[in-house]
Each structure stands twice: as C-alpha cells, then as structure tokens.
Amino acid sequence: MDFLLLGLEQLARWDVALSMVAGAVIGVIVGAIPGAGAAVTIAILLPTTFAMDPLVGITLLLGVYCGSAYGCAIPAVLINTPGSPVAVLTAVEAYPMTMRGEGRRAMSIAYSSSFVGGIVAVAAMIFLTRPLAEFASRFGSAEFAMVALFALVLVVVGHVGQRVEAAAALSFGLFLATVGVDRAFNTQRFTFDHTFLMSGMPLVPVVIGLFAMSQAIVQMTDRSGPSPQHKLTGRFFDGFFEIFRYPVTLFGSSAFGVMCGILPGVGEFLAQQVSYTVAKRFARTRDQFGKGSPEGIIVSEATNNAVPPAAFIPMLALGIPGEELTAMMLAVFLVHNVIPGPQLFIDRPEFVAGLYTTLLLMNVVIIVFLMVATRWIALVATVEKRFVGAMILTLALVGTYATNYRLSDPLLALCFGFLGYVLRRHKWPVTPVLLGLVMGPIVEGRFRQALGTANGDFSVFVARPISAAMVIAIVVLIGLAIRGEWKRRKPLEEWQINAD
Amino acid sequence: MSNVATPTNRVESFALNGVFAAISFALLAALPFATRSGPDKSGWWTQPWTMPLIALTVLCIGNAVTLFLAGRDLMANRPTGDEVAAARAAIFGWFRPIEFFAYFLGYIWLLGRAGYFLSTALFIQFLLFRVGLRQRKWIVAGLAAALALTAIFRWGLGIWVPTADLYGLFPDAMRKFASKWF
C-alpha cells in the first residue's frame, strides 16, 4: 500500500501527469496511422526525452507505447488495415462486423479487451517484478551472463521461419556493440581512427535509421493510396461489457500475453498468433472465427495489450529487454543513469512505484480519451501513406542532427536507414540488430566478469544450479530450433529430389 | 505493410545475400587490423577481439547459410528471363532511398542557412512534390505541418538550431525574433 501511495505521490507531479496524457494521446494517434506506429515514434522522441527527468521522459514514451497498442485497432476496424502488424487479427475479426453495421460494437470490444489485457499485465508486473528482482539478487556474473545468453537465444528462436536471418541480424548488432574503445584495455575496436566512433556506436542514429528512416522510405514509395473508410454505425457502448461473457477467453488471452511478454523475443505478433490459433480450436464461438467474431477480437486485443507491460518484468528485474521497444526504453533508462536490475528496487523505489502507478493509470487515461475522441482519431487512419513517410523523414532531423549537431550522426542514421530499408524489402528481421546492440555490452561484460573470477574456467557456468539450468535450457532451445528448421527445410529437399 | 505484401524476387535475394556475406567476411578479415590484444597475462576470453570475433563468426556463418540456401534454390529451379529482369529493376530500386537521403542532407545544409521553419517547409514541399502529392491541399498540409513542427520543437521543447545566415539580413529586432522562434 505504501508503495502505491509512493507511486501516486510521483504521479501528482504536474510534469509526470502531463507527459502521461501527452504520451497516451500521441500513442493513440500514431497507432491509428498505418505505417507510423510506436517504434518509429519512440525512435524520434527518444532524444527529446534525454533532457527530461527520467520518470517524465519514460512516462512519455510509455504513453506512446501503450497508446499505440490501443490505437492500432482503429484502422483495423474502419479500413481493414491494421495500424501495426500486431492488429492484423483484429482486422480479420472486426472488419466483417463493421461491414455488418456493428463497427462501434467491434471498436468497443477492442478497447475494453485491450483495457483488461493491459490491467492484467500491469497487475502481473506489480506482483512478479519485485520477487523476480529479489530472486535475481542472488545471481552472480555467471547467472547474469547465462540469462542474457538465454534471452538472445530466445530472440533468435522466436523468429520462426527466419532463425538463420535473425541469428545473423543479432550477431551484427552484437558486433556493432563492440565498436569503440574497449573499456577493459583502453584499445580501439573497429573505429578506424574515426573520433565519432570512439565512444561506441551511438544508439539514437542507429534506432532512427533502422526504424524511422527506413519506414519513411517504405511509406513514400508506396503508391497504394488510402483505403476507403466505413462509417461507424451501431451503439458505442454495446461491446464494453460484452467481453465478460467470455471470461475464459478474456483472462486466458491476457495471461498468455503476460507470459509471452516476459519471454524475450516472443513479442506481440507471435503471442497474438499463437493465442488466436489456440482460441480458434477451443473457444465457445470458434465456428464464428474469421467471420466477425467478438471473441476473436477479444483474443487478439487482450493478448496484444498484455505483452508491453509484461515485457517490463524482465527488463526491470534483470535489465534484459525482450523486444525493440523495451530495448529503446532500456536506452532511456541508461541515459538517465537508472540501471535496471535488483538494485533498482533498493536504490530507487520511488521511481519503480511511479512507473507502476503510471502504467496502471495510463490505461484509464487512454480508454477515456478513446471514448471521447474516437470519431476524430478515425480521421487520421486514412492519411496518405506518402505524406506520413515525408513527415517521418522530416521528424528524423530532430533526432539525428539537432541532438548533438554533429554531421556524423545523420550520416550514420542514413547508412542504417539504407540498411533497414534493404532488410525490410527482403523481410529480414530488423529488431535483433537493435537487441544485439543494446545487449552486447551486458553480455560481454558479464562473461568477462564471470570468467575473470573463475580464472577462465568455463565450468563456472555449470557449477551453480541456476546457471546450469540456463545452460541446459539454452542447449535444449538450440536443439529444438535446429530440429524445427530441419523439418521446415525438408519439403524443399523432397521437392528438389522430385525435380531432379 | 506494403513491403510485407511484395513477394521477394529469388535472384534479388541471392544478390543481397551475396552482398551481406561479402561485407561480413570483409569485416571478419579486418578483425586483426581493427582490434588490438591486451596484455599477454590476461586470458583470451578477456581480449578485446574475442567478442567481435564471436559476433562476426556467427554473422559470417548465418550469411553463408542464407547465401547457400538462396543459391541452391536458384540451381534447383533456374530463374526465368523475366525474373532476372525484375531482379535487375529491383536491385536498382535499392538505391531509391539514396535520392531521399540526398534531400535529407540538403535539408541539414539548408537548416543553417534558412532556419528551422523555412528549411522544414521547403523540405516537406519538395518531398511531397517528389512523391507525387502536388495538389493544393498537400501544399497547405505541408505548410501546416512545418508550422506545427516549429511550434512543437522550437516553441515548445526549445530545441536549439544554428542561427540561420538568412536572418543576418534582417533588421536587428526581426533577426532576434526570427532566431528565437523560427
């Protein structure tokens, strides 16, 4: 109780409250614009938050993060185009309802399921993060090294069908993390005597290049034009309480979303797909799935919205981000000298309490905003993609150049923008590059520390139970992934034999 | 979303995998020149080259595997002339971003000469023109967007930008005003 009161005290600050509302509003709006989305917006806003108080800056970005998860349902319902790929199944279920004249009902089901998913995940975060952090306080370097490695392996394994590509992208990110002066020996690594690389690969230009600039080019070269929008009909509050007719689906999907959020590398998209596939088999109205089923919207939205807060559990307790947005958040934490991990709960309890309370109230702010402003937000869902692309590229200037006023930063961002564009064209995963870049120093530092204390004896990783369990889990995961890839590639081999 | 819907051309994929593999092997080959060893008494696991070596080795293996798979696919099912022509066009398409990135560099150059508002307005108008949005409503929307961005970043967040050369031509009071707000 004291902890929550401490959080409310933080929230009583006008700057925190203002950034929560601003973040939520921006998040919902960008979520509703197909092609904009949270990753692009956070990448652009990231440098502007560096000058803010940690809780204010992080609250603003959290608002964008959570708000966009709600907002992306709007174009899915109205124009059959998800605001971000994670709302694709919402579109599958909600759009047929819109066509039947039940657009408002579909919208309110999406909002209320998102709300329940978000609240369940924040509750899980409040109850699980601290025990996990206390458990992690017993970790030594070997355990941390293995947990970090386990997270990296999960990131690769989570990219089903693209594991080789994900491994390559992740290792590229890990390589980028090594560029700069090595702190242990004060020697340069891959700087080629360029002074701007001495302090390492700057995160902001990389993030803006990979996520914002590449997306801007994709949008500007897209000639498909805006999709026609259907008018919202029906009663808005019809679906708000309808979700409680399916309690198992609602809370089961939320719990599954929480589980997937905790596991690094799974992310909203995969969580939603798996949750939907399972629900399609066992749900009460499974025969309605794909034809405009309210239960289908519940599965999609509750799972989606449970993932982001849950992704904070390993990030806060262990300092390990699970996907691109928590990786960006980790960067903000580090810039503000807030070091996630067990010590954070001892050193900065007011910060953690503020974060919990903000996330909890954020969902309320967003749902109220949506109830009031949906009809106006709906207008942005059909904004011309080329215009959105031009805006993203324009905004990228603030993030790349106007932060340090070094020409090297925008040039670097342009290089990563080009790389991101080529990767996107070929459907290669971009996120592992960022995760590798953020996780690289953690992994390297912990491994050096663990091996240093054991005088290079690798048995240090299997000498203690937690670390040994992690080693076994890593071996099993890699084994299962190789088996899965082998099976996936087999049809090609058989086809080849037939062709020969 | 559009890129997700576009099927990947196999020849283009092979070429891209080849480029990635070449870059990754070149980086691995540069490792001895781009890193230095620490004191001899420290173990290999602490050496500055260990982590780049591991990362680049995995990168090379990953790229070699994808290149091999793409090559095997092409060998098993030879590309048609149309596919090769489409790949050629697509490979030229890789350089499409360079055009936009050149405009972006122009925008940075202009920033120090014309100030944030004017350079942003010109950049947006130019981009909209290039992507084919040339009607009056887009011109107005672009100007409104430039004004909104100026309001957010210059008036609201107070982002500093270099004083524009253009403002030096204004009378003193106007120069101060323009430098502060635009």
Image (spheres, helix red, strand yellow):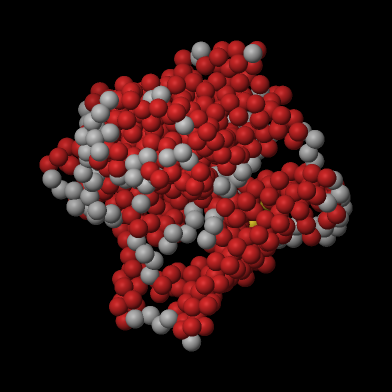
Residue B71 located left or right of residue B52: left
Residue A137 located left or right of residue A328: right
On the question of residue B24 being in view, the answer is no
Point 40% across, 45% down: residue: A287
Residue at the outermost left position: B136
In the picture shown, does residue B172 fall above or below A195? Answer: above
Using the image as rendered, state which of residue A450 and residue A482 is in the foreground.
A482
Point 55% across, 66% down: residue: A488
Q: Quadrant of the C terminus of chain B?
A: top left
In the picture shown, does residue A361 fall above or below B73? Answer: above
Residue B51 located left or right of residue A297: right
On the question of residue A361 being in view, the answer is yes
Residue A270: horizontal and vertical position, in percent?
Answer: 51, 48
Using the image as rendered, state which of residue A160 and residue A116 is in the foreground.
A116
Using the image as rendered, state which of residue A143 and residue B45 is in the foreground.
A143
Residue A164: horizontal and vertical position, in percent?
Answer: 57, 63
Point 47% across, 59% down: residue: A428
Residue A247: horizontal and vertical position, in percent?
Answer: 50, 30
Using the image as rendered, state which of residue B84 and residue A449 is in the foreground.
B84
